[in-house]
Image (spheres, grey):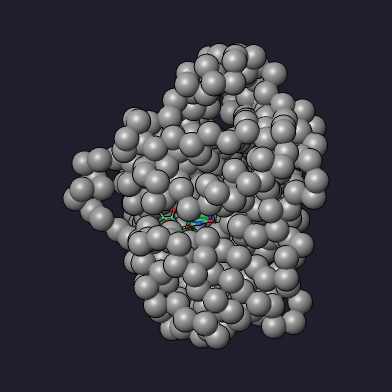
Amino acid sequence: MHRRQPGNPAIAALALLNVVLWLVFVTLPDDVASLYAFQYAAEVCSSTAVILIAMALVLSARLRFLERHFGGLDKMYQTHKHLAVLAFVLLAVHFVTIPDSGLLIVGKPLGMLALVGLVGLALLTVAPRLPLISRLLHLPYHRWRITHKLLGLFFVAGVAHYLHVGALSTGTVPGRYMLLLAVVGIAAYAYKQLLARFLEPYRPHVVEQVKRLNGTTVEVCLRPSDRKVDFKAGQFVFVRFTGDRHLHEAHPFTVSSSPREELVRLTIKASGDWTRYLVRNLKPDTAAAVYGGFGMFDYKAGGRDQLWIAGGIGVTPFLSWIRELDGRPGVNVDFFWAVRGAEDAVFLDEFRAVAEKHDNLHVFVRYGAQDGNLSVDQIDETVGGNLAQKHIYMCGPIRMMEAFAARFRRLGVPAAQIHYEEFNFR
Ligand SMILES: Cc1cc2nc3c(=O)[nH]c(=O)nc-3n(C[C@H](O)[C@H](O)[C@H](O)COP(=O)(O)OP(=O)(O)OC[C@H]3O[C@@H](n4cnc5c(N)ncnc54)[C@H](O)[C@@H]3O)c2cc1C
């Protein structure tokens, strides 16, 4: 059954504790309280922002032991994003409320550097979601990732700013608390940038076959050189092809084969530079390093009646699930797959063959180009209502999943019964 993860509440508690420590340990004498009120508020905001960014750095260090506390690595990246956005709002409040001392001190330029850098990185991150900015500034993912690595350096500048400005909390309990968490964040950043590439465990594999499924999608079959990468059905791995210099960067892909198979199969659609190159050029015998598995997208943790909804290439976790089936699925499943046209529905026969053998698995496909987009109301009508009882598993374009999740909520499905995997970390 679905279990609430303590990760996000724990981070909220760390931030809240900061405010409590301020209220308890940094008290201003009555005669100067109004004079320092703005500085006080500004510093509570900035110290909370420091704690949030420190935690965001910890989450981006890809520490596997944290996954189960957040519901999977993909959810950790989402929390990372939300923490950063919240921190940037707090920093902006800090910037507009902090009184100018008029002194020329080294802390000031450090603070400006941190603020401009962090806000700039936040804008680059949200740019693809802002139509005007994304038109002006098209930053491919791999370039964005290079800029994003500066996050930790701007953070260090922010902490150095704190140490040089004679803050109200200097030497107090909340001051030390914030510095302690900042050091944890900096350590996580240093680990990720300097050590992770040597310490992160990976399994060497070799490309056995590259099967062309249609004009834009291939199935890459990987043979383990020694031990196979360890994954559960529905999990994703990071893979880099060490035998091709254009494919050295690690990218995430859900494993589409069953964990019981000898080979590891990835189904990859060309959606940017790296995947386009791979679809056109990846050859058998290329060496690959596989990291994982990651994620907690697992229908076995859900209830008896389930809806599985895939959009396009988001079908891969469901493929792994049906390929792992040994006998009848233990749950009743209505599987909906939204694709643009018949040429994209490359695994439909396989799904239908499994459904023929199992009377509690039903398969529905929707061809968007011909019949229009799939909607929650059509799903509701097809399955005969009663949605509130169902556990819903979705994987596909984020806009589709967000819209579907909102509609399911309005139709009475509790949030805890809606599970989704996002194919996007930015
Ligand atoms: C958990 C997860 C599972 C996925 N499973 C599949 C799958 O089974 N099949 C499939 O075809 N695609 C899958 N994807 C998407 C796939 O990772 C991207 O399409 C691919 O990385 C695009 O890279 P690109 O350089 O070709 O395109 P770009 O245009 O550069 O990137 C497109 C988007 O892909 C994401 N992305 C790119 N590179 C990385 C990276 N190194 N790390 C993290 N995210 C990145 C970013 O969100 C980016 O905005 C999955 C993504 C995630 C996050």
Q: Nearer the viewer, residue 201 or 21?
A: 201
Q: Residue at x 60, y 65 (%)?
A: 265
Q: Nearer the viewer, residue 231 or 193?
A: 231
Q: Relative to residue 146, is residue 64 depicted above or below?
A: above
Does the rendering let one see residue 157?
Answer: no
Picture coordinates of residue 336 (x, y %)?
Answer: 54, 34
Q: Position of residue 321 (x, y in %)?
A: 68, 48
Q: Residue at x 41, y 66 (%)?
A: 275
Please provide percent x and percent y for residue 271. Answer: 37, 58
The quadrant of the rendering that contains the N terminus is: top right
Give whichever of 282, 67 is nearer the camera. 282
| Number of numbered markers | 0
Q: Is residue 390 above or below residue 154?
A: above
| Image: 384 above or below 347 | above
Q: Residue 251, image x and y in percent?
A: 51, 65
Inspect this view and state whether residue 368 appears.
yes
Direction left: furthest residue: 136
Q: Nearer the viewer, residue 374 or 68?
A: 374
Specify the quadrant of the image occupied by residue 370. top left
In the image, what residue occupies the spot 26% across and 47% down? 134
Residue at point 53%, 51% (across, down): 347
